[in-house]
Image (cartoon, rainbow, N blue to C red):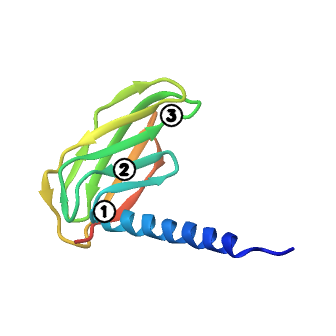
């Protein structure tokens, strides 16, 4: 089977375009050192800020097929902590609780969140805050 020069040219153009789009995406993205989502079992913590500043932290707990009373706690290794609201949720529901540290934390501080469903721990994600 012969492949003509035009096929190689089209392939080259497609690869060049894909490379350019990937490069543009990387250049356009803002550095997000603290922003992101980290999960463990049925619990996720999500931050929306960059650098060492945390204004709002979201704690998500999946109720699975159980439902029940959900509570959460978010804390850092340098002593800050806050509890989320207590809420009764149905089966197959994601509970969302928010805490508002509104402060800078030293680089290297660990941010952790733990969720409970009917008094049983269902996950403990942690992340290290970097500058």
Task: Name the residue located 55 percent from the left edge and 69 percent from the top edge.
Answer: 13
Image location (x, y in percent) of residue 6: 67, 71
Task: Name the residue located 45 percent from the left edge and 46 percent from the top edge.
Answer: 43
Task: Name the residue located 51 percent from the left edge and 71 percent from the top edge.
Answer: 16
Spatial CA span between label 3 and label 2:
15 Å
Instruction: Compare marks 1 and 3 and give the one earlier in the sequence.
Output: 1
Image location (x, y in percent) of residue 103: 12, 56
Q: What is the crowding at mark 2: few (fewer than 14 residues within 10 Å), some, or many (at least 20)?
A: many
Instruction: Compare marks 1 and 2 and give the one earlier in the sequence.
Output: 1
Which mark is nearer the camera, 1 or 3?
1
SS state under label 1: helix
Which mark is nearer the camera, 3 or 2?
2
Compared across the picture, whether 88 is left or right of 52 comes to right
In the rendered image, which residue does mark 2 sit on? 45
SS state under label 2: strand
In the rendered image, which residue does mark 1 sit on? 28
Q: What is the crowding at mark 1: few (fewer than 14 residues within 10 Å), some, or many (at least 20)?
A: few
Instruction: Compare marks 3 and 2 and give the one earlier in the sequence.
Output: 2
| Residue 88 versus residue 60 in the image, above or below | above
Q: Looking at the image, do the residues carrying marks 1 and 3 touch, with CB atoms under 8 Å apart?
A: no
Compared across the picture, whether 82 is left or right of 62 comes to left
In the rendered image, which residue does mark 3 sit on? 63
Q: Nearer the viewer, residue 8 or 65?
A: 8
């Amino acid at each position: 089977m012969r492949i003509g020069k035009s096929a190689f040219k089209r392939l080259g153009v497609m690869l060049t375009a894909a490379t350019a789009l990937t490069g543009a995406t990387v250049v356009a993205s803002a550095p997000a050192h603290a922003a992101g989502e980290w999960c463990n079992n049925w619990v996720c913590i999500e931050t929306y800020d960059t650098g060492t500043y945390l204004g709002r932290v979201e704690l998500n707990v999946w109720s699975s097929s159980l439902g029940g009373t959900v509570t959460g706690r978010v804390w850092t290794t340098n002593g800050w902590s806050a509890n989320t609201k207590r809420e009764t949720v149905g089966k197959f529901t994601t509970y969302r609780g928010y805490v508002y540290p509104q402060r800078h934390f030293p680089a290297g501080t660990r941010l952790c969140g733990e969720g409970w469903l009917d008094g049983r721990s269902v996950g403990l994600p942690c992340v290290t805050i970097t500058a």
